[in-house]
Amino acid sequence: MHMPSSDLHEIIYVSTLADDTPVRAVADIAMQARSNNHQSDITGLLVFDGLHFCQQLEGGAQKVAAVMARIQGDPRHRNVEVLHQGPLDQRRFRRFSLGYTSVEDIELLERLQRLKGQAAIDGFVALLSGLDLDG
Ligand SMILES: Cc1cc2nc3c(=O)[nH]c(=O)nc-3n(C[C@H](O)[C@H](O)[C@H](O)COP(=O)(O)O)c2cc1C
C-alpha cells in the first residue's frame, strides 16, 4: 500500500509579468529556478503565456515555503496569488526540478486565476493534459 511521504507539500500560484520585465528574462528565471530547486529537491512546473505565470511547486513543506517566500518578493512579477497550498501524497513531477512550458492561449491561465483550492488543482491538472507533458 502506498503511504504518503511525510511532509510533501505543494503550492500553486498565478502571477503577472512586471511591466518593466522583458519577456526574455523568463528564460533566466527558469534556469535559475531549475538549479535552485534541484538543490532543494523541489520539483514542479512553470507555465507562461506571454503575460501570466502559473507555477506549481512540490517538495518538503519547509523548502517549498522558503522558495515561495523568495518568489513572492521577486519584483520581476506582480499580483502573486496563491490558489492552493497543502499536503500532497505523491509528486506530480518526478523528472522536473522546474519544467517550463509556454502556452499560446492567454485564456487558459486567466481561467485558472479565478479558481481556488481543489478546483485550482483540477484546473491545473486539466491544463497539463492539454500540454502533452509527462512528469
Ligand atoms: C515567475 C517566477 C518563478 C520563479 N520560480 C522559482 C523557483 O521555482 N525556484 C527558485 O529558486 N526561484 C524561482 N524564482 C526566482 C526567485 O524569485 C528568486 O529570484 C531566486 O530564488 C533567488 O535565487 P538566488 O538565491 O540563487 O539568488 C522565480 C521567479 C519568478 C519571477
Image (cartoon, rainbow, N blue to C red):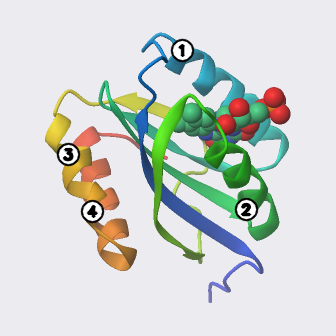
| Image coordinates for residue 34, horizontal then vertical, percent | 68, 31
Crowd around label 3: few <14 · some 14–19 · many ≥20 (10 Å) = some
Alpha carbon separation for disc pair 4 and 3: 9 Å
Question: Does 126 sit left or right of 2 as displayed?
Answer: left
Question: What secondary structure is found at the residue carrying circle 4?
Answer: helix
Q: Which residue is mark 3?
A: 108
Look at 26% across and 30% down and name the residue there. 103
User: Label 1: which residue?
Assistant: 25
Q: Secondary structure at mark 2?
A: helix
To which residue does mark 2 refer?
A: 65
User: Nearer the N terminus, badge 4 or badge 2?
Assistant: 2
**For numbered disc 1, what is the local secondary structure?**
helix
- Alpha carbons under labels 2 and 3: distance apart: 26 Å
Residue 133 quadrant: top left
Disc 1 to disc 4: CB gap under 8 Å? no
Amino acid type indicated by mark 1: Ala
- Given the image, on which type of amino acid does mark 3 rest? Leu
The answer to whether 44 is drawn above or below residue 58 in the figure is above
Mark 1 → mark 2, Cα distance in angstroms = 24 Å
Query: What distance separates the C-alpha of mark 1 from that of mark 4?
Result: 27 Å
Identify which residue, 64 or 88, lies in the foreground. 64
Looking at marks 1 and 4 on the same chain, the residue that comes earlier in the sequence is marked by 1
Q: Amino acid at mark 4?
A: Gly
> Residue 45 placed where, x, y %?
50, 43
**Circle 1 Cα neighbour tier, 10 Å, few/some/many (<14 / 14–19 / ≥20):** few
Q: As drawn, is 53 to the left or to the right of 93? A: left
Mark nearer the N terminus (4 vs 3):
3
Location of residue 118 (image quadrant): bottom left
- What label sits on residue 123 in the rendered view? 4
